[in-house]
Amino acid sequence: MIRAVLIDDESKGRKILYNYLNKYCHNIDIVGHADGVKTGKALIDAKQPDLVFLDIEMKDGTGFDLLEKFTQFSFGVIFVTAHNEYALKAFKFSAIDYLLKPIIPEELIISVNKFSKDQELKNLSYKLENLIGNKNEIKKLALSTNKGIELLKIDDVIFCESSGNYTVFNTSSNQKIMVSKTIKEYDTILSDCNFFRIHQSYLVNLDYITKFNKNDGGFVILSNNKKLPVSRRNKQAFLDAILK
């Protein structure tokens, strides 16, 4: 039997996954569940599971934050996330599987079977260490639009603009791509990728800033000659970021 734990801050998500595992994956023995980074770390230390089903966005941090608390790995990880923007291609590169919410039972079975065939701990440890070492080297975003999914290189994004519950990506090739997620979500994803939230409505790639002007409350000029305001609240932090 594979001893597994479930770590997700949504009780409904944990319950659905628990029920699916009990119904479809009879080789899984669920030995505990947790609702965040702190409780997840304690659970793994206490139960020493073979496999961790891990959410990415949780109230007290991310799944990456949890994994970084370990110097050695004696367990495998299957990510369970609602965010396909988290460089899922990079997860595959690290040979760590993932499931997108809502969970499809057939995909859950495939992931568990994949893990069952690959339980050599040295191999699992290498894969997790590789993921942690490269988590900030996200190269592409998978953007779900009304026409399908577009894979966009992060380096090609000049800035993101808020439009209510939507975000518009403005690229170096003059594309505008609208996605039905808020700019706050992309701020979380891109903050480690040289992006800065200069204003409630704008998230900017610092590499494309050509000038900062203190007049009129403060604004930046981008490489495409776009002029964007810098909010008074974010001004000092922004200056600290560009003067590093």
Image (cartoon, rainbow, N blue to C red):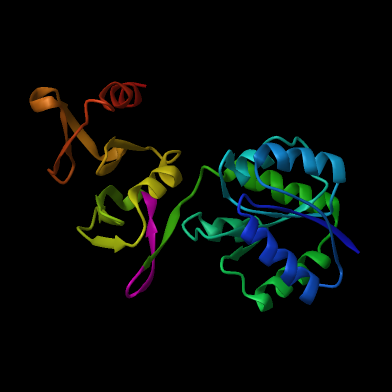
Q: Is residue 150 magenta?
A: yes
Q: Position of residue 146 (x, y in %)?
A: 32, 73
Q: At x 69% / y 36%, what residue is drawn? A: 38
Considering only vertical position in the picture, is 80 above or below 130? Answer: below
Q: Is residue 232 above or below residue 204?
A: above
Q: Residue at x 67, y 47 (%)?
A: 35
For residue 95, say whether it is visible.
Answer: no
The N terminus lies in quadrant: bottom right
Which segment is the magenta one?
145-154
Q: The C terminus lies in which quarter of the figure?
A: top left
Which residue in the rendered view is the most extreme toward the left? 216
**Residue 15 locus on image (x, y percent):** 69, 62
Asked whether, in this view, residue 142 is left or right of residue 106, the answer is: left
Q: Is residue 94 visible?
A: yes
- Name the one closer to the observer, 90 or 8: 8
Q: Is residue 91 above or below residue 205?
A: below
**Magenta span dominant secondary structure:** strand
Depicted 45 relative to depicted 20: above or below: above
Q: Position of residue 98 (x, y in %)?
A: 63, 62
Q: Residue at x 64, y 52 (%)?
A: 8
